[in-house]
Image (cartoon, rainbow, N blue to C red):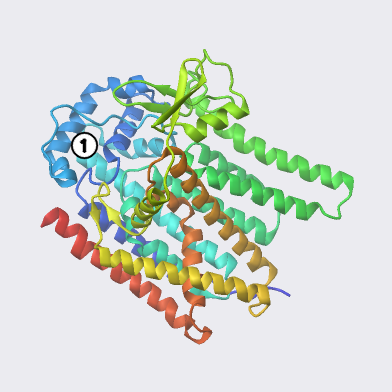
Amino acid sequence: MARPRVPRVRGTTVALAGFALLRGLLYALIVPPWQAPDEPQHLQHALLMLESPGQITREEAYGSQDLIEGVHRSLVTQQFWFFRAHDIPPSEPQYVAAFSHPPLYYVLAALVIAPLRGADLCVQLYAVRILSVFLTTVAVLVTLCIGRRIFPDKPEVTYAATAVALLLPMHTFVGASVNNDVLAELIGSLIVFLSVDLTVRGPSLRRLLTLALVNALALLTKRTLFFAMVLSIIVCGWVLFRWMRGLDRRQILSGLLLLLTFFAIAHDTGIGLLRLINGEMQKPFSFHAWMVAREGPYRVFLPYAVDEQLPPPTLAERAVFWVTRQMDRWTAPVRPGLTVSRRSLSVWDMVAYLGITFAGFWGNFGWLNVPLSVRWYLLLLLATAASLAGLVRLGVLLACGRVRWDRERRKGLAVVVGAAALCSVQLLGTMIARGQPQQGRYLFPALPAFAILLVLGWLYVVPSRWRKEVSWLISIGLALLDTVVLVYTIIPFYYG
């Protein structure tokens, strides 16, 4: 039976894009310079790309004293430390370029800054913020596309999920800042969409190659996209396995070759681009790379560095290193000259850390120093719990056959659930491994999945006759939250 097709309303899409751009620009202009997480480090990285194209090294980051001091003077002028901690500025610079990140976002930022060489740092900062707003707007539209692909005949689900991505205050705040999380969200959203599309419409060479290309871009963007690459592997393997059932041996071998081609393109394209950017100075990413700890003003781990004095690690050694690195209270040697440490978390530690993540998902602005009131967090916690209850009810209804969805919709929803689950596991694993809380913005690469699940939960926690009204209430409630954030939280904090 053919799925019902609903005509796409281009005017609605254009209106949503325009509204997303306007809201993003509003946040970009209202938030003072440097008051979003890690903006000094990320802008310095982009500026260094203009002077020395390629992967920025630690030596280049710490050696750019003129840039470091210029950013420090701008921070002092813009009252950075007063807003962040109500403290006097330090006498020495504290921020250098975020040199350990993959380069793709900074290449785009450098292209935007290039016509503004010699301009004030704040002018360059606002220019890159506008780039981030554009990327975030595209990510919002990707959420719309995912909803239309899974629910072509249920616009209330599609538009309510898009409203979550559009009106979530913390998402807009991060999306209007200088941060590579913005590009990571767009790449992650595209991988989720392409995985849904591949699952719903079936395999084709074009879809597989497109997914491989976007995965290669993920390698060049940020490590928080690891979950999305795992999702791609699972989806491709499952789709091709289903496709090869009932085929003859030659067709099966062709399918396996296609799968190997996907992995080769995804891996080698990313590696090749990184090596090209680096000028073959080092192996920036390799399955034999070692996480090397470097001493300096800050103790950092370079995930793309290869210590030539250490042979490639075994799988067991690498697992131990990943699980225990960057901890305290307990140390153990992995190899001579290389030690890591570990810290165990109590249940209450995890509860507190999850609370920080929850607040950072819905709204904890500035450098996590401009929170909402406790009442708002309690209200949001109740709303999230209601959505979880609705998802449980939906699962029971689907299992009992009382809600009948076609196979394509079930498969698309399975990909959405998988994306949200993998991203959550990645965040929890990082939290446990590092022994420190993780910010809620690290869930945004899977925001389309979380938005769809939140909306489905809210719609199915109420009787079916109320669902269209509830979809409108979702948008109205988020618009109210966004207004409260701007008028009663962000603007009073920075402007009195």
Q: Nearer the viewer, residue 200 or 477?
A: 477
Report the quarter where the N terminus lies. bottom right
Name the quadrant containing residue 262: top right
In the figure, 154 relative to 179: above or below? below
Q: In this view, does 49 lie above or below 124?
A: above
Q: Quadrant of the C terminus?
A: bottom left
**For residue 318, what is the image quadrant?**
top right
Coordinates of residue 177 in the picture (x, y in percent): 30, 47
At horizontal 51% and vertical 59% (from top left) the residue drawn is 449
Is 281 in front, or is 386?
386
Q: Position of residue 429 (x, y in %)?
A: 49, 44
Drawn side of residue 144 relative to residue 476, left or right: right
Amino acid at dot 1: Leu
Q: Which of 287 and 188 is in front in this view?
A: 287
Helix, strand or loop status at disc 1: helix
Expressed as whole percent of the image width and height from the top left, the position of residue 413 reads: 60, 64
**Whole-percent x, y for residue 104 in the image:** 44, 37
Q: Which residue is drawn at 20% across and 35% down?
A: 119
Please indicate, yes or no, whether residue 7 appears anywhere in the rendered image: no
Q: Which residue is drawn at 84% across and 47% down?
A: 251
Q: Mark 1 points at which residue?
A: 121
Q: How crowded is mark 1: few (under 14 residues within 10 Å), some or many (20 or more)?
A: many
